[in-house]
Amino acid sequence: MNTENVGARILSEHKNLRALLRKVERSVQQPAGSDAWMENLRRTLSDLVDLCAEHFRLEEQAGLHVQLRDQSPRLAFRLQKLLAEHSGILDTLEKLVTELPAQAVTSRDVEPLKQSVSVALEAVRQHERAENEVMMDAYWEDIGGEAG
């Protein structure tokens, strides 16, 4: 798969990721604490873990970051930083899922749980925004400029 195809697929996955992040947020905002709420949160967070793992694997195995770095050396530090974030993001999301209580939680325990989920979602969003910025910088300023 060439750089443009991989880049298009990654941008498409970012769209799917944003939709799933909104779904997790909606899950968190539902009346909280019940068994059903907990199961819905567990399911949506698990879906997010799966999508992030697949997405990160594509980025790492397709070599897009290497190709972008080679074509846009000025982006090397930002690209390396983004790759390094993958494992931390996945670890955080997986920990959230595994540490979710098996049953309903008290109202006292709901807010810290919601806060933890919100922090994790914001980390994913920031990472995704940074990736989009790097890709756009590379394509529009470096690669696109060379093609014309």
Image: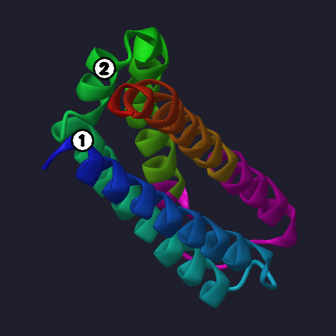
Residue 10, relative to residue 70: is it above or below?
below
Residue 105 counted in the magenta span: yes
Residue depicted at 61% across the width and 42% down the height:
129
Residue 93: x percent and y percent? 49, 50
**Camera sees residue 101:** no
Quarter of the image that includes the C terminus:
top left
Residue 47: x percent and y percent? 42, 70
Which residue is situated farthest in the front direction here? 148
Magenta range = 97-120
**Left or right of residue 101: residue 85:** left
The residue to which callout 1 is attached is: 3
Residue depicted at 35% across the width and 56% down the height:
8
Q: Nearer the viewer, residue 87 or 16?
A: 16
Q: Secondary structure at mark 1?
A: helix
Q: Report if the CB atoms under discs 2 and 1 are less than 8 Å apart.
A: yes
Res. 71 mark: 2
Residue 131: x percent and y percent? 50, 37
Q: Secondary structure at mark 2?
A: helix
Q: Nearer the viewer, residue 50 or 7?
A: 7
Residue 15, relative to residue 86: is it above or below?
below
Residue depicted at 34% across the width and 62% down the height:
50
